Amino acid sequence: MMSIDMAAVRLAALKLEQGKLVAFPTETVYGLGGDAENAAAIADIYAAKGRPANHPVIVHIAPEADISYWAATVPEQARVLISAFWPGPLTLILKRAAHIPAAASGGQDSIGVRCPSHPVAQALLRAFKGGKGGVAGPSANKFGHVSPTTAQHVRDEFSGDVDSLLDYVLDGGQSEVGIESTILDLSRVDTHGVVLLRPGQITVDQIAAVLGVAPNAPDTAAPRASGTLDAHYAPHTPVALVTADELPTLLSQLAAHGYKAALMQRTTLMTVLGDVIVMPIDPEHYAHDLYAGLREMDSRHADVILVESLPQTADWQGINDRLRRAAFDSSGILARLLQT
């Protein structure tokens, strides 16, 4: 069982109550936390991340908290999902209660809420406002960059900010899950049913097993949600997703053109060039290592990060989603590097 530094937790809770920003661990990734009912603190979160003000954040609450405080209505499907998956990596989008600041939802009439399972996060949420508050917490990194899964990742991300708004980093070890929570929209359940806005560790099959029906795909009228822009989760180095069969030829071609490649692979393929990380073959451990791997590859100062493409099955959906968004702005990078 994890040992919790309660003095550090109490200090972090005090800073949150003072309107300051605190990075805190969750089982998914580290969050950049502020008082979800303090519009000024939420504004500081956006400023610290360089995040668009219309991009909503997720409110984290303690296991004993009353979700009805945050949501105007809580449909039965939400209560079923809460019973099955909370505490855990599942965010529910619900109609926002009138007294909750619109800033937390990017000005929308909905609110994203989840209850994390990380013991340090739970200790913090119980200490903050006597367990009755909520901590708005997007990932503790610059907007669009690779999410942090350790306290050191957070420190590295903000160490260059002379005027950083981040006041404190609460260390809880490495995040166990490693990718952000599954997000389900239930704010329009009467008309649109349950809608999957972002895949994560909790899969569509698991959701369907609980609800008796699979969640619907997002529609154009769906509320905006964290981490759903086309380009997101990206290292500074361009990323290209390639099949195992393509890798030997690509590596040879890149070497012939004088380019350095960094490679994240699942197979034991022999490489002819580049720094290599061999990733786990199962989705649970791959997700755990994904962001740390991308950050490590970014530090190698390569011209491109090659990521071996993954199975297209439900249990890999969340990881494939993150990699697709990480590579979005690098579309066509291999053609540009290899053109003669």
Image (spheres, grey):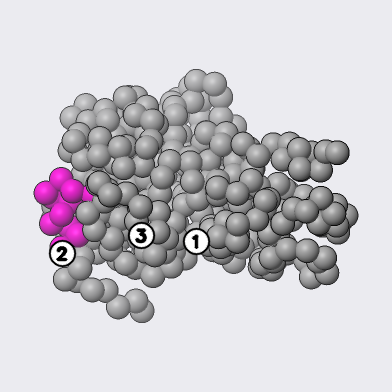
Indicate left or right for 158 with 331 as reference. left
Residue 64: tell me if it is visible.
no
Indicate left or right for 103 with 265 as reference. left
Q: Which residue is mark 2?
A: 10
Instruction: Tell me the tag on residue 155.
Output: 3
Q: Position of residue 117 (x, y in %)?
A: 37, 61
Question: Is label 3 or label 1 in front?
Answer: 3
Q: Which residues are drawn in magenta?
A: 11-21
Tell me if residue 136 is in the magenta stretch. Answer: no
Q: CA distance from mark 2 to mark 3?
A: 20 Å
The amino acid type found where label 1 is placed reads Val
Of the two numbered discs 2 and 1 on the same chain, state the one appearing first in sequence: 2
Name the quadrant of the N terminus: bottom left
In the rendered view, tell whether residue 10 sits above or below residue 240: below
Q: Which residue is mark 1?
A: 177
Name the quadrant of the C terminus: top right
Q: Position of residue 255 (x, y in %)?
A: 81, 56
* Circles 2, 1 touching at the beta carbon (< 8 Å): no
Look at the numbered disc 2 and give the secondary structure of its residue.
Answer: helix
Label 3, residues with CA under 10 Å away: few <14, some 14-19, many ≥20: some
Of the two numbered discs 3 and 1 on the same chain, state the one appearing first in sequence: 3
Q: CA distance from mark 3 to mark 1?
A: 20 Å
Q: Using the image as rendered, state which of residue 204 and residue 10 is in the foreground.
A: 10
Residue depicted at 48% across the width and 25% down the height: 222
Q: Using the image as rendered, state which of residue 119 and residue 274 is in the foreground.
A: 274
Q: Position of residue 148 (x, y in %)?
A: 44, 56
Label 1, residues with CA under 10 Å away: few <14, some 14-19, many ≥20: many
